[in-house]
Structure formats: structure tokens, C-alpha cells
Image (cartoon, coloured by chain):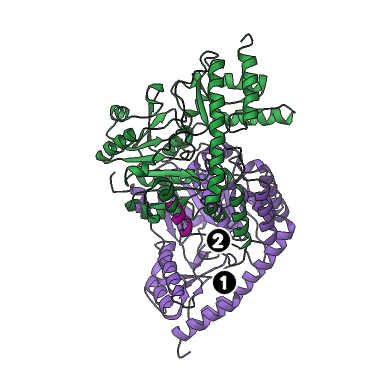
Chain colours: A purple, B green
Amino acid sequence: MSDTPARRIDRIQPFRVMALLAEARELEQQGRDIVHMEIGEPDFPTPAPVVEAATRAIADGEVHYTPALGMAALREAIAGFYQERYGISVPAARIMVTPGASGALLLALGVLLEPGQGVMLADPGYPCNRNFAHFLDAQVQAVPVNAQTGYQLTLERVQQHWQPHTRVVMLASPANPTGTLIPPDELLAIITWVEQQGASVIVDEIYHGLVYGTPVPSALNLGERMVVINSFSKYFGMTGWRIGWLAAPSYLMPSLDKLAQNLFLSASTPAQHAALAALEPQTLAILEQRCAAFEQRRDFLLPALREIGFDIKVEPQGAFYLYADCRRFTDNSFAFAQTLLQEIGVAITPGNDFGDNQPQQYVRFAYTTSLERLQEGVRRLQQWLTPDG
Amino acid sequence: MSDTPARRIDRIQPFRVMALLAEARELEQQGRDIVHMEIGEPDFPTPAPVVEAATRAIADGEVHYTPALGMAALREAIAGFYQERYGISVPAARIMVTPGASGALLLALGVLLEPGQGVMLADPGYPCNRNFAHFLDAQVQAVPVNAQTGYQLTLERVQQHWQPHTRVVMLASPANPTGTLIPPDELLAIITWVEQQGASVIVDEIYHGLVYGTPVPSALNLGERMVVINSFSKYFGMTGWRIGWLAAPSYLMPSLDKLAQNLFLSASTPAQHAALAALEPQTLAILEQRCAAFEQRRDFLLPALREIGFDIKVEPQGAFYLYADCRRFTDNSFAFAQTLLQEIGVAITPGNDFGDNQPQQYVRFAYTTSLERLQEGVRRLQQWLTPDG
């Protein structure tokens, strides 16, 4: 057996945060108290009606394979969710259930991308996106974005960076790590233009339930020809269940079905039953309370970090992240994150995990822990970073 | 958006059995009684201790992301299973938990195969294997196998079909659709020779718990340098949970970890807790009873089908399939399967789903339904196919 893995593996960078997480756990085992602001996982438990539904389904023996596209009832319920929340009619036939948004991204890119074709995406951005492209031996076209455009691609940026081999543009709204949205008119302009080039848009709406202030439309409100990715992990608080979905143009569904039959067989059946309960009114009421709690945390953390000296240039309207320029304190965000962990027990994610666009001067704070813990984290940061403040 | 999916999608054939399954369900909705011998899914429910453990884990809030390699406790328990059942020491560090064997196959092929490299596999064989290769833009080298070698690859066959670009040889023991084993000495010879060529062997042991008669060693008994795939779906009766594992050489583990972090994040957490209970002695005792029931079904179905006139040339020693030559009745196994479904309500899988090696003269019977139902199926087949018998 040759000891060299396939080249695609070399192109995939390991996540820096994993090393920090391991270090944080070690410190905790030594008795240290760590404020976790590094984790992209809500601290809230899976809502009680979801837990009950899953338990019932398992007891009833609902643990067999489902169709590769997902249980019909769940696809219908997701269609109902779009109708209810966004006032749009997305037929269940255009919706498929996936093993997390990860599964949805792999399927969508798998049916759209030939090896060597280009995927345009924003840098900074969700790190797995470029790694899915590497996995498929596609070309990653990372476009540096900054505060001027809310850390998002714009039509102008897309046009500037367009290449003859560009095949897919990936957008995320709200985005990880910046929490920013793409304005609907910009989104529509990008989608329209990209489609005119015979290429495709994938819109990641994984954090779409977590938008603070005015509700925003889904990309699905703007047409039928893009692929929209979503998940039960973040807004619905079901990370470890591994369940998500996508909505795609009708003509892609047979390809997606065929691919899912082979790659996954189907998504986890207990998780599908759990997800069905996640869409019920009583669960949604719980989730809205949590959304309000996230907003409250943001409203505390954003000014508090700015006051300490972190430069957060754009007020994020969604998700549970703040992407902060830490140039005032360091020119090496990874070393900075390590120091904060070791010295004051505050865990954050260095910019390196989100791309190559000035990552050494950015860190990501996740407000996935209670307001009290965030306050404790801010207190420690303040003492350490501004001792004379 | 261009309406043409990526070329890899065209290379993936849809499963013929899905059309038959849909037809079977339609007939059932019309009130017809269907004997299901088409489904590769045990009819037994998830064992009670597994259900209890999953319910407890969910109630305790054990539904967060785990490390990409899986929960440490589950990896240790799988290592313990190898020690207990096979008398081999496989360190937990060489074991990873995956979203089904499907996830394990994607990861293993993903780290081993460059685009354009060759994957050698037996035809007939598990259809997803060649489709994983297509997905990765690798070359499928399907080697026709027949009764002479128990429908398995041999060292001689591997050597005959070897190409300079061959990078991976996929073996399965017991195999789907034939239920046959590879003798340990042949397995060792293949592994040794393939490794000498600087290539890799993947051994699918998904049906390894379901071997009737003398217990057989795992490929892991033969060395450390192949990748072994396994699953909680078949022997453990946990299909819809989507949980499996692989064991790999140490040097591949960082690559597998990195890839799993990106493709899956982690396997379903409730399923991991369920799987932990699946390895406990009380569950294994239940599973051994089920294994005996499968053996009893095989011992009924094999001679019964032979008597009707199906030619089953090799007695299968494992899995829950019989791969039967139906030339006496048809030269079109797909049409034959359709006719049997429509006329007598017996659902079986046509050979077309398993490759291109004389598929029109083979069908697969799965004994994943009770002895009584198998008897009913045989009665119908007998009446229809040998009315004067």
C-alpha cells in the first residue's frame, strides 16, 4: 500500500480550531474554567417536543431506511415551513432531506461540478465549502471580501472574478464567520447574472432562522433555479442528529436522488422523525425564544468587544458569530487565540480557518454560550487586554 | 443555470430495484399482498437494549457533535469487539466511526484514489462501489466473476486484470449479491500481492456477522495494511440509524479524520450511543439468535429455489442473499422480476443492479422476511413457474 494519500487530501487544510479545542479540553481536565466562544454549536438542548418525537419513533420501530430523498411527510412539512414562514410555494418534489447540510453541499456540488471547473466563494467563508470543491477536484476561486460589501460577494465582485471555467457561485446569508446578510436585490442580481452565464448559484441558508431585526426573504422567494441549502443544526438546535435539507430546481432532482442513493442510502431515520417535530408550531415557539436570546447576546457582546478594542466593522444581522479585527493586539491571530486560551481561559477561533484573506488579523467569537458566560469572557478579555482601561 | 448535470452523474446508473419497490408499494396500496424478497434490510427490529440506550442518550441531551472520528467510547468498544470475537488487537486509534458503511466507503476511496486511477472490483457486486468510484472520477475495472471462484476475485483474476493505473482492489466477504466468502488464504494472497504493487485493498465486511457454519477470520486477522469496512446495519439490525465504521492503517487516520471533518462533521450522535449498546453482551446474544434464524431461512430457501429450477451454483455461506440463475425461465431478468411482482406478488431484485456480467440471467433473492413469508413466496413461485410440477 502506498503511504501517500490522494492529492485532494493535501489540498484540504485541517481546522486550526480543532487543536485549540483539544487544548481547551485538556485544560478543563486540569480543572481550568474555560469560556467557550469558539464553538459553532448552539448551547441550547434539542427542544423537548423534538426529543419526545424521536423517542416515540424509535420505540415504534421507525428506524428503517427511508427513500433517499427523505420521508415524504418531512419533505411536505419543509414545504409547509416555506409557505408559512416565507409565503412561498416550494413543492415537496423540489425538496430533499440530507445527512446534515454537509450532505446537501456534497450532493449539490457533486451534481453541478466537473473536475477542473471553478467554484467562486467569499473569503472569509465556511471552510468546508472550499474543501468540498477540493474533494471533487474542482478549482476554488476564493474572492477576498471586506467590510465594504459586508464581507459578501456582490455582482460586481462576481463579474470581476469570473473565469470561463466558473461553474458554481456559493453564497451564504447569514454567513459564517461574519454573520452578515446579502441584500435581496444584490442576491437577485447575482443569481440572474450567473444564470445568464449558464452557471449555478448555491445559497447557504443554514443560519437563516437566526436573523435579528427585520425578517428577510429566502433566496427561494427570488426564483426557482438556484440550490438552497438548509439544516436543522443551528436554528433548530439539532447539531448532532445530522439532518438538513436542500431545495433545488426540478430538473436536478433525479440526479440528486441517484447520487444520494449511492452516497448515503438515506439520512438517519430517527433524525428525520425528530426533524418532523422540529417544524411544529410548539417547537417553533421555543426556537423563537432562543432566537431572541441570541439577539440579546449579540447586543451585549458586540459593543463590549468594540469597547475593548476589537474592530468589528459591520454589525452582523444574523447567525451567532462576530468576526473581529484584532490588529490592535496582534499580527498573528492563531498565536493570539492560543495565548488567550492559556492565559485567561477564553477560547475563540483564529481567522486562519476561514480562508487566506488577512486571516492573521481576524478572530471569530461565537455567542453560543450563556449571557453570564459571555460576560465572564468579556471581563477576562478586558483585564488582560486593557489592564489600564 | 445549465441543465446538464456533471458527467459523473451520467456514469451512475439508477437502481432498477427502486422502480420495482415503488411498484410493489403501489400494488400494496391497492390491497395486494406482496412477498418482499427484494430488500437488503433485515426484517428484525433494532434490538431492545439498543433502543433503550438511544432513548436514554437522547433524554440526557447526548445530541451534540462528536469528534469526526467518532466517540472515543465507541471506538474503544469496537476495538473490544475485535478482541472478543476475532482475538485480534486493533487499537481504537485505527478505528473510526462513520455515517453508515456508505460514509466509510466514501472516505476510504476519497483518501486512496486519484481521478483517473483504477478500482478493481468483482462483477456482480454491490452497486454503490462502482458509483463511489464514478463519483470520484476514477476508472472502474469490473472483473467478471463466476461460480468457479465462488463469484469472488482471486489472486489470479486480480493479476490478469491488473493495469498500471490500478490503485485500489475492493473485496467483499460475505459478498452482496452472492453471499459467498473469500477463503482466508486467497484473501491473504491478494492483499500481499496488491500491496507489493504499491496499491491498496479495501475489504467490505458488512455482512461478516452473518456467516453460517464455521466462523471465519476478519481480514484484520491477516495484517494491518488494508482498510476494512463494517456497519451496524446488517448483523446489528440498525439500517436506518446510518452508522458504520472502518479500520485503517495508522498512517491513513489523519487523512480520514480531515476528510470526515469536512464531508460529515461527525456521524449521528444518537446513533453512536445506540451502537455502543449494540456491542454489549446482551445485545450480541439477541443478534446470535437472529443469525441462527437467517441460517434457517437460507437452509429452507436454497433447496426450495433449486427445486423450482433456479440454478444456484454456489452455496452461500453468509449474508442474506441467494444469487440465482433464472435462465430456465427467462433471458430478461428485469422483465421476469416485473412479471413475478405483477402476476404473483413476489418482489425480487434483477441482476442488472449488480453489474454487467450476464445480469439478464440472474436475480437476487433476499431472505429478509420470515420463514412463513418465504414459504408463501416459494409456493407462489412454484405454482407460477412449474404449474405441472
Q: Which residue is mark 2?
A: B64
Whether residue A116 is visible to the viewer of this picture, yes or no, is no
Q: Secondary structure at mark 1?
A: loop
Residue A28 in the image, given as x and y percentages of width and height: 46, 74
From the image, which quarter does the N terminus of chain A lie in? top left
Mark 2 Cα shell of 10 Å, populated few (<14), some (14-19), many (≥20): many
Q: Which residue is mark 1?
A: A369
Q: Which residues are the magenta region?
A: B67-79
Residue appearing at x 55%, y 16% in the figure:
B307
| Chain of the residue under label 2 | B
Q: Secondary structure at mark 2?
A: loop
Number of numbered discs: 2
Q: Amino acid at mark 1?
A: Thr
Whether residue B118 is visible to the viewer of this picture, yes or no, is yes
Residue B385 in the image, given as x and y percentages of width and height: 61, 14
Q: Residue B165's quadrant in the figure?
A: top left
Residue A67 in the image, given as x and y percentages of width and height: 61, 39
Which one is nearer the viewer's eye here, A75 or A177?
A75
State the predominant SS element of the stretch in magenta. Answer: helix
- The question of residue B78 being in magenta is answered with yes
Residue A10 in the image, given as x and y percentages of width and height: 34, 53
Alpha carbon distance from label 2 to label 1: 14 Å
Which one is nearer the viewer's eye here, A101 or A133?
A101
Q: Amino acid at mark 2?
A: His
Residue appearing at x 50%, y 48% in the figure:
B99
| Chain of the residue under label 1 | A
Give the answer, above or below, for where B337 lies relative to B227.
above
Q: Are marks 2 and 1 on the same chain?
A: no
Question: Residue B209: which disc?
Answer: none
- The question of residue B381 being in magenta is answered with no
